[in-house]
Image (cartoon, grey):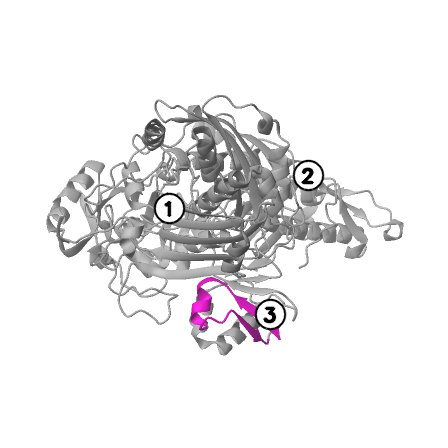
Amino acid sequence: MPLDQSAKPNGFSKVGTRPLRPDGIDKVTGRARFGADMNAPGMLIGKVLRSPHAHARIRSIDASAAEALPGVKAVVTAADFADRQDEFRDVLVNIMARDKALYDGHAVAAVAATSTAIARKALALIKVDYEVLPHVIDVEAAMRPDAPILHETLVTKGVEPKPTKPSNIAARLEFGHGDVAAGFAQADVVIERQFRTEATHQGYIEPHACLASVGGDGQGELWVCTQGHFMVRDTCAALLGMDISKLRVTASEIGGGFGGKTTVFIEPVALALSRKAGRPVKLVMSRAEVFRASGPTSSTSIRVKMGIRKDGRITAGEAELKYQGGAFPGSAVEMGAMSAFACYDLENVHVVGYDVVTNRPKQAAYRAPGAPMSAFAVEGVVNELAERIGMDPIELRLKNAAKEGTRSAYGPTFGPIGLIETLKAIKSHPNAKKKLGPNQGRGVACGFWFNFGGQTSVSLNLNIDGTVALAVGTPDIGGSRASMCLMAAEELGIPYDRVRAVVADTSSLGFNDVTDGSRVTFASGLATIKAARDAVRKLCARAAAMWGIPEDAVVWEEGAARPAGPNAGSFPPLTLREIAAMAPKTGGPIAGHCEFNAENAGPSFASHLVDVEVDPETGRSTVLRYLIAQDAGKAVHPAYVEGQFQGGAAQGVGWALNEEYVYGADGRLQNPGFLDYRIPVASDLPMIDTVIVEVPNPGHPYGVRGVGETSIVPPLAAVANAVSHATGIRLTDLPMSPPKVLAAIEAQRMAKAAE
Amino acid sequence: MVQVRLGGTLQSYSGGRSSFEVEGATIGQILAGLGEACPRLKPLLEQGVAVAVDGEIYRGSLLHPVSPNAEVFILPKLAGG
């Protein structure tokens, strides 16, 4: 169905306002129910035994003593999950190790018992005979020919001729166009740098948690904290050999996900335990388990080379990206490669990427997966180019920025995009004019994210009192229920507080893809608009029947059906409330539906400007000011759009300055807790300033673009560029933690003293 | 005929060829035509790809119409966080 672009030409009465979110009171009073908050009669406690080795062959597992322990009702291992060779194979092996443990924390067995204490005791009674194997943690080390091999059957894809030997390089890929050698030949300045970033965790506050119940008739229910309960249902049904219709999954409230809850870890295990025990099983990860055994992002090694003319025009860009994605193929290198130079209008660009496996937990998506790392490297070189030719870094970016009609570095031509508008917004903002003091520096960086749509279903039911029950199937992570209510209210012409949105379970609604790709306000929002328009058509038809005139002689305006014109007849308007009240006697319930595949999400660009102060005595960086300008297309709920901008920046600051997975020589994670894995807290950050840019997305009737992910793309580079400006030293490895910065400052002092 | 260009890893399955001329009025027909023109690509196309038509990325719309002069890029399957 073509979108009606003229439906809301100027005047929004609800969209663009900032009402309270419907889940807000529950969340601040503790009434909201998260993953671990659900209980069931006869419920057992599940616990998982995890490998202490980074890489080990599992010779045998003896669970007989655990099974004999009073209070233990079930023990499961890989033997309880049928092997398979399809697209679920890696997930299957990740949720429960089969012949080998592939990382420290890999699940090898699980128990269900009548108490936590008994479950823990049972884990200690399970005897696993390991043959410890050499391991590899570092991405460059994993690519060497003599590296320990994780998978004997893994050969590098994307290489001709097809390799005959196994490798830890799962795939090689490339993007680009033009002739980079010719481009570099035209340049006055060419800069080439090597960068590294460490693995970071999404750091969601709520650990993975679920309550599973499988009855004797083979029918199951699952309550779970997830970004996508339909995905959980389909994956678990496949891994357990169940019909999809026999598993009903309900999404709890969610305490953060950021991509890390777009797959399954404990859910199939809890279902298998419940099926074996014949009782409900609750399984909750500890924070240490979250770090060791859920999905952090990739660590990377990146080389970037760029050339520029003295007039500020970039002539070529080249990059080599190496991303390790943990123990299975599927790092985000492909999207890192595609997005690396997406902010720039380049005639000559070439990116090569390598997807590498290591003895670490299988990486999961993390907010704009793959993009922050490649942007960190490219934006660092762009800033250095600006310094070398003596051009303001914002001016240089404006001169080279991608715009409508630019052929993107990854291939397709951009439609209307707002990068230039975001650059102009930071350039004219008061923060750009603040004077800097000693040891202070200013950094700028840009970022891009594709944004996605996806399969979406929404039902909109009119109640007899004229209120509206809106059922969506995408878990609400960032306030999306408020945005859905605003869009429904806008279309129906009724107050915001007369619409209530719920996240419906998998048996109550058609399929929905997970909440990812910055898709929900765009895709579920579009489905809500379509469902509301479906309901309006039915409301008009009902009014027409009540008036005895043709359906096409009725229009919907300001929350009421009205005759389309004088020829249609003279009838007083029938409001939504009046039609709903008469519905039982005029044909029955009225509802609107939409089931579709949303496309044309429209990319979002951002520009960030940050000021930091670096303490030369300790190497500690303090963020003084932070400014974000990002294209939202149309901000449905501006406060939550700003919140997405700020949240992404806060996570990016942590990635830039402190966060990293630290492994010992034994391949074990050394810092699986928030005490030693330092995420920014409120006192670490200033109030983050925001500017919402609105360049409408032609793929949405209101112009909406997703905003959730782009905001984490620029901060790694923006902060690094600011630290470089403050210290006069260009650091190329993240995190720029105090010891690393201090060492660089001291090396600089020594070098100056030696001159 | 529609000119279809390949991005990313796909080119290594086409012997380095970066574009093909195929018949087709929809994304599905174009993918089928591409699979016939280059059988080594077929398994990848069946696993799922994204298709950019005139700059707009489609991930699940085999029935979407494509005009003969459209810009068509085949991209890897994409997902977000």
Q: Which residues are magenta?
A: B1-23
> Amino acid type of disc 2?
Ile
- Say few, some or many: other residues with alpha carbon within 10 Å of mark 2 (under 14 / 14 to 19 / 20 or more): many
Tell me residue B25's x, y (percent): 62, 72
Which residue sits at x=19%, y=47%? A53
The reply to whether residue A572 is in sight is yes
Q: Is residue A309 above or below residue A163?
A: above
Q: Which quadrant, please, contains the C terminus of chain A?
A: top left
B13 in magenta = yes
Residue B48 vs A338, above or below: the answer is below
Residue most toward the front? Answer: A755
In the picture of the structure, the residue carrying the numbered disc 3 is B26
Q: Check disc 1 and give the amino acid type.
A: Thr
Task: Tell me the residue that label 1 is attached to.
Answer: A297
Q: Disc 2 or disc 1, which is closer to the eye?
A: 1
Looking at the picture, how far across and down is residue B70, in whole percent? 64, 66
Q: Between A259 and A305, which is closer to the camera in this rendering?
A: A305
Q: Position of residue A21 (x, y in %)?
A: 55, 33
* Cα–Cα gap, marks 3 and 2: 40 Å
Could you say which quadrant of the image residue A291 lies in?
top left
Residue drawn at x 32%, y 51% as measured from the top left: A362
What whole-number distance in Å separates the C-alpha atoms at marks 2 and 1? 43 Å
Give left or right: position of A281 versus A490: left
Give the chain of mark 3.
B
Q: Which residue is mark 2?
A: A494
